[in-house]
Image (spheres, coloured by chain):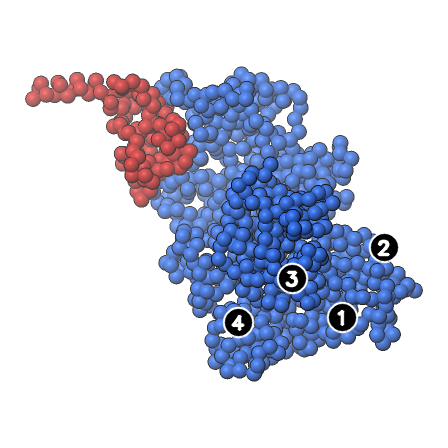
Amino acid sequence: MTSTDKQRLIIIGNGMVGHHLVEQLVERDATTRYDITVFGEERHLAYDRVHLSEYFAGRDAQSLALSTSDYYAENDIALRLDEAVTAIDRDNSEIVTPLGRYPYDRLVLATGSYPFVPPIQGGDRPNCLVYRTLDDLDAIREAGRNANTGVVVGGGLLGLEAANALKGLDLDTAVVEFAPRLMPMQVDSEGGELLREKIEALGVQALTDRATQRIEDGEASYHRMVFQDDKVLETDLIVFSAGIRPRDELARACALEMGERGGVVIDDHCLTSDPAILAVGEVALWNDSIFGLVGPGYQMAKAAANTLTDGSERFQGADMSTKLKLLGVDVGAIGDAHGDRTPGARMYRYLDEIKQEYRKLVVSSDGKKLVGAMLVGDNSYYDTLMQYYSNGLELPDDPASLILPSSEGAPTLGPDALPDTATICSCHNVTKGAVCETLDAGATDLGAVKAETKASTGCGGCAALLKSVVDHELEARGVEVDQSICEHFAYTRQELYSIVQVEGIKTFSELLEKHGHGLGCDICKPAVASILASCFNEPITDAAHVPLQDTNDTFMANMQKNGTYSVVPRVPGGEITPDKLIVLGEVAKKYQLYTKITGGQRVDLFGAQLHDLPDIWQALIDAGFETGHAYGKATRTVKSCVGNTWCRYGVQDSVGMSQQIEHRYKGLRSPHKLKFAVSGCTRECAEAQSKDVGVIATEHGWNLYVCGNGGMRPRHAELFATDLDDETLFKYIDRFLMFYIRTADRLQRTSVWRENLEGGLDYLKAVIIEDSLGIAEELEQQMQTVIDTYECEWANTLNDPEKLKRFRSFVNDERPDPDIIMTSERGQLRPA
Amino acid sequence: MTTATALKTETDTMTWQTICSKADLVDFSGVAAWLETADGPVQVALFYLPGHDQELYAVDHHDPFSKANVIARGIVGDLKGQPVVASPIYKQHFRLEDGQCLEDESVQLRTWPVRFDGERVRIHV
């Protein structure tokens, strides 16, 4: 299997950093020189541990996943999950697992860390758990079923995350911290006190200065925790989250150089004491430090990928500044937040006990540079402070103004004040200079910059900053951020939509006359045609509309590369009778059409000549088919699994629901194609989370997911609402789709629309669920209009001889196009 | 004088072919038709822009980029005031006036003079 000229690279560990390393290697084409094998101890592919507590708030393993097994397969990377490496045999350059021995030329340790459990008597009792992996969370959930109360031991960052998870299980939750305050690493005593008040107001009890001596049987609850002063606390469930320790046992056993308190020693190239072996992430000790945040781990992964591909980039340490929302409370810490590492440092503090906000600045002895900062209660000050800190910018004359409240909100440092070296996104280490380069190379919007640089796709903390930099730089370049759809209309798609709707304009020529100029073009014509269809739903084949359509819409079929068309009848929910299947076969045979099953559970018939389309459709319509709109920026298909009608796991009738959805929205035209899916249970066989609208059955109804996408840039759909009844489900989808249709750019899928939506998912929920804009009823009515006016476009056309005239290959002769030449392959015809 | 006029009329009848009728055209769009030439049959795309300075255009139906015969099925419009058709396959724009591709200087479609003669569409070969 292994080609002789390639080296064998083994990566142990498939966590966030291990996966990032894989991505970095793929980006550098490292698969051309390495056969890469990745071992993961867990059965799950790399997932987002930062957002683990959302697992109890409705997100499942799949939506937390950072990648897919397809990604690994496509890049020829062997992924061996659920296979823990048990030893490294350096003498023979092999690693050992329970399933065998695997040779390596280069080896990377990305084994991460494990939760530290303090040596407490009784700490190994049942229902004493840890918080680190999805399996840990499953165990916590299981234990939570029979529990009323839960205690987290550890009041640091991870402890508060774990407390959030317990709260998500509806347990009465308490946090026990050994230090005199919560988050002792990040905040001082004032900040800690404020944090405690805020957290307790949210219903989580915070006990500080508590050293647990032992855990024993409780009276009212399962456990009793006994503290140093013999005070006790009873609880049913205990979760230890008191810090992490590197998973360095493999390295220790094969005698790599270790730190005194653990961790594999690495240099700037992430090389261990054995130059064939590298280490990255929380197992690695660099300059006597373990970095327990994902950002520095990603930077190590990047440096390691560089080392493996002979690049020169090194790991040069990482900033541990962080901004978090823990239990709904903002906490931020920048640089030397305590001011105890900077000789002569001076501080400014601001405390508001009413609004419960606390901010602290630590400045250099000359008062000119920011060396640290601390925030509790409002992180909107973070970005600006971070820029002063990380770029060494000179502070204003009155530094206190940076943390004092002002009626305009947090002070912002204009993006123009940032030097090119300023780091915008620390997760992916993207500088302002790099952003500018992509703009110079032709990127014209935020989405393109994100796709190109990956900025703001890690923790997302820099989203607002990135947007302001992009907007500012575009403007500075004189790229008048001209949002006009094209030279014929000085309006955006959204504006054109409003004009059409408000003025009731029903044709392109009227719109052009009143609000545009010229003849129009291949940009504005289809865009306006789509708007008109969304608003009034007149047949697109009517004389006024037909010149606006792309060829696919004009001929209601998909043009292929040789000028022939493919035909896809609607098969609602992918359910089809044998009789209809036979008709598809007969039609395909008669017209010699190449036949292929689509990803949307339909049948695609390729190679139809223009003049044959009406006859083909007459046969299909006679058999009860309708047009499938595979040619349109419109509702495509609703994929479904077989559901509880047959499947022993199904909890709802997913096929029935998918048909209801398909019939409801068929014919709906939108800025881009719309794909749907319905799964009958949480196993998700219909892959609903990769669709614009995904519906997954629960025991109580339906969970609704929105804005997913497959394609070039896959995006998991986000959980939007849970346990909906049928009526509410339709109501939300009606509103969601119409809101998207109204506000998206042309050819913008829901995924990109969602990523550019200011306010994000919360805003979308507010509009759709809480009707914050007061337009919900209007959106529903508009959808109802489209539903009520649905008509099969092909049936309409077949009844109109004038429209049928359009389907002549040549208007003056019945000779077919002699340049369409077919050849045979695998028993079917294809273009020669 | 009279000889010259007679000669011109004769040339006229020989080189202006009737290719189709006005009713075969589609407003603000294109149709394809066969044209008989000395070099054999050619597929042409006919575009009709009613009410504009020049209402009728005839260009090659063959798309040099995709090598498929599809130009008549493209969207018609204008770029900076010049009437164009966009190829329905890879979306290059061709000027209707002279067939010039706007994205690639080296590519040009053939064009033919074309006009109405009552209800007939006549093309000059």
Q: Which of the chains bears the disc numbered 2?
A: A
The mark closer to the camera, 3 or 4, is 3
Q: Nearer the viewer, mark 3 or mark 2?
A: 3
Q: Quadrant of residue A654?
A: top right
Q: Residue at x 48, y 57 (%)?
A: A312
Does the CB distance between marks 2 and 4 fall below 8 Å? no
Mark 1 chain: A
Residue A340 sits above or below residue B102 on the image: below
Tell me residue A384's x, y (percent).
Answer: 52, 69
Q: Secondary structure at mark 1?
A: loop
A692 horizontally vs A126: left or right: left
Which label number is shown at residue A177?
Answer: 1
User: Is A423 positioned to the left or the right of A322 in the image?
Assistant: left
Query: Cβ–Cβ below 8 Å for labels 3 and 1?
Result: no
Q: Which residue is mark 2?
A: A146
Q: Colour of chain A?
A: blue
Q: Position of residue A81 (x, y in %)?
A: 68, 45
Pointer 3 with pointer 4, Cβ within 8 A? no
Q: Is residue B4 left or right of residue A426?
A: left
Residue A552 can be seen in this image: yes
